Amino acid sequence: MSEMARLREQVCTYAATLYDQGLTHGSTGNISVRTPDGGLLVTPTGSSFMTLDPARLSLFDAGMLHVDGDKPTKEMPLHSAFYETRSKAGAIVHLHSCHSVALSMMPDVDADDFLPPLTPYPIMKLGRVKLLPYFMPGDPCIGDAIRGLAGKRSAVMLANHGPVVAGKDLEAAVHAIEELEAGARLAMMTRTLSPRRLTDAQVSALVTTFEVDW
């Protein structure tokens, strides 16, 4: 199997896994992954993660021209912005996962550190997650907001919309966004219970030990 064929299959396999976990629904969510020649494979607009066809994924060349496959997701501005500002990004996943969206609606959430430090793994996998304001889906201003972070965050939360995570490859991006949703679910479950959080010293030790972008 060629590298391109493997990537096509991988996008569809991970998309179905996310769908099966209930982290996306209907025709929501989108994925992009770098191709060996510097282009992108992108999930098409209006497609379901449950029924993606590897042959119909949108293909962009290294100049970001759409050269093959179905029409791409309308969220291309946010994908492009992450690739432009994070040179090591090999894949991006955007979902409308329930608990992270619910947490983004809460009035007391820290916009600079969206997930409270309850467990180690969201810190290790994501660093600080930036909560961005609400934008209409497909709005080019989403890309501008991501560029404004100058590549300092690997994950953002679009308020009332959904999380976006960049990873070194698709596996890393998928695992990180799963961790984001799990962290948000835990935060929503415990938000009225005054849970013990990790201390500043414990967070600092994680950041140092695992070389987290912070």
Image: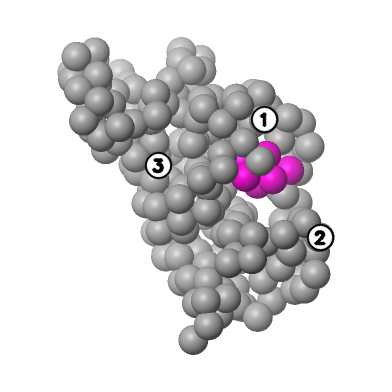
Q: Position of residue 77 (x, y in %)?
A: 73, 43
Point out which mark residue 65 bears.
2
Mark nearer the N terminus (2 vs 1): 2
Find numbered disc 3 in the image and state the secondary structure of the residue it sits on. helix
Q: Position of residue 182 (x, y in %)?
A: 34, 41
Picture quarter containing residue 71?
A: bottom right
Q: Please provide the residue range marked out in magenta.
A: 77-83
Find numbered disc 1 in the image and state the secondary structure of the residue it sits on. helix
- The amino acid type found where label 1 is placed reads Arg
User: Looking at the image, is 107 positioned above or below residue 75?
Assistant: above
Is residue 187 among the parts visible in the rendering? yes
- The amino acid type found where label 3 is placed reads Glu
Residue farthest bottom in this picture: 1
User: Looking at the image, is 163 positioned above or below residue 92?
Assistant: above
Point out which mark residue 147 bears.
1
Observer-nearest of 185 and 91: 91
Tell me if residue 157 is in the magenta stretch.
Answer: no
Q: Which residue is mark 3?
A: 181
User: Looking at the image, is 50 positioned above or below residue 184?
Assistant: below
- The amino acid type found where label 2 is placed reads Leu
Q: Residue at x 78, y 37 (%)?
A: 139
Q: Position of residue 66 (x, y in %)?
A: 80, 64
Find numbered disc 2 in the image and state the secondary structure of the residue it sits on. loop
Direction from residue 128 to residue 33 in the image, left or right: right
Observer-nearest of 190 and 57: 57
Observer-nearest of 42 and 73: 42
Direction from residue 134 to residue 103 in the image, left or right: left
